[in-house]
Amino acid sequence: MLALTRKKNESIIINNNIEITVLEIKGDQIKIGIKAPRDIPVYRKEVYLQIQASNKDSLEQEGLDDLRNLLGLKG
Amino acid sequence: MKAQTRLFGEIDIGEDKIITFKDGMIGLPEYKRYTLIYDLDKKDTGMIKWLQSLDDKDVAFPVIDPSLVIKGYEPFLDLDILSDDEDVKADNIIVLVTLTAPKDITKLSVNLRAPIFINSSTLNAAQCIQNDNSFPIKYYIYDIIKPESKTE
């Protein structure tokens, strides 16, 4: 991993079109500003990982036969 | 084109039925081409559709129309996410949510935090995480589906 040291209000540029700025430093919290083209999704990593896990669970379909039976009651 | 599917064997897909996720589904960026399979003849009344990858037969998400399980669900779509489309209209956008059917079927849930948007005119699509954390990742629907089956 590349590590760069930045001060408040300093930025880094990624790939010509993404700018990340340190906006505020307060104790162990840092506020970061991200300027990126709008078609580039930016997510908090912990949320991203939760969605990734949810997608994985969705693919496993362990209870699918039970679900079919449940819905089959309709017919 | 011919495609292998997880549940329906080999099927023939018209080029006009290929859905393109330019960023893939979240956590699966390498799979970009999907199709939507309607499961009408398996006694489940077509409620569940299958978002089937055309690149890997084992990748098939069960998805449903969220309006079947929740009223007034209005996830936000930044139209630029479907940026290859010159003319994106809200009317053209289909919203689907992934379904998770775990071993304990009473824990059946849909993911309202990361809905799937499909532009029905261009078939470009994206799964978008909602910033609004009041949308649950696991929205339990067993009790919503179950009573319906009793009344019919």
Image (cartoon, coloured by chain):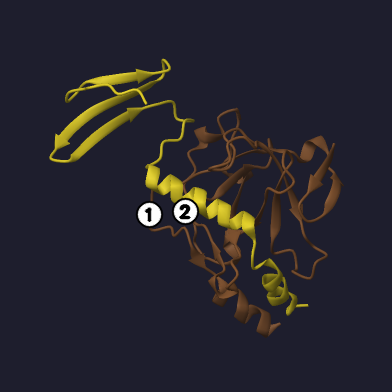
Chain colours: A yellow, B brown
Give the image quarter of residue B66. bottom right
Q: Secondary structure at mark 1?
A: loop
Disc 1 sits on a residue from what chain? B
Amino acid at dot 1:
Asn
The residue located at (70%, 74%) in the rendering is A71
Left of A63 or right of it: where is B110?
left
Left of A70 or right of it: where is B7?
right
Q: Nearer the viewer, residue B39 or B108?
A: B108
Query: Going from the N terminus, do you reach mark 1 or mark 2 first?
Result: 2
Q: Residues within 10 Å of mark 2 (few under 14, many from 20)?
A: many
Amino acid at dot 2:
Arg
Q: Circles 1 and 2: CB distance less than 8 Å?
A: yes
Q: Residues within 10 Å of mark 1 (few under 14, many from 20)?
A: few
Residue that badge 1 annotates: B133
| Label number found at residue B112 | none
The residue located at (78%, 37%) in the rendering is B16
Above or below residue A17? Residue B68 is below
Residue that badge 2 annotates: B113
Above or below residue A48? Residue B124 is above
Return the x and y of residue A25 as percentages of the image width and height.
Answer: 16, 34
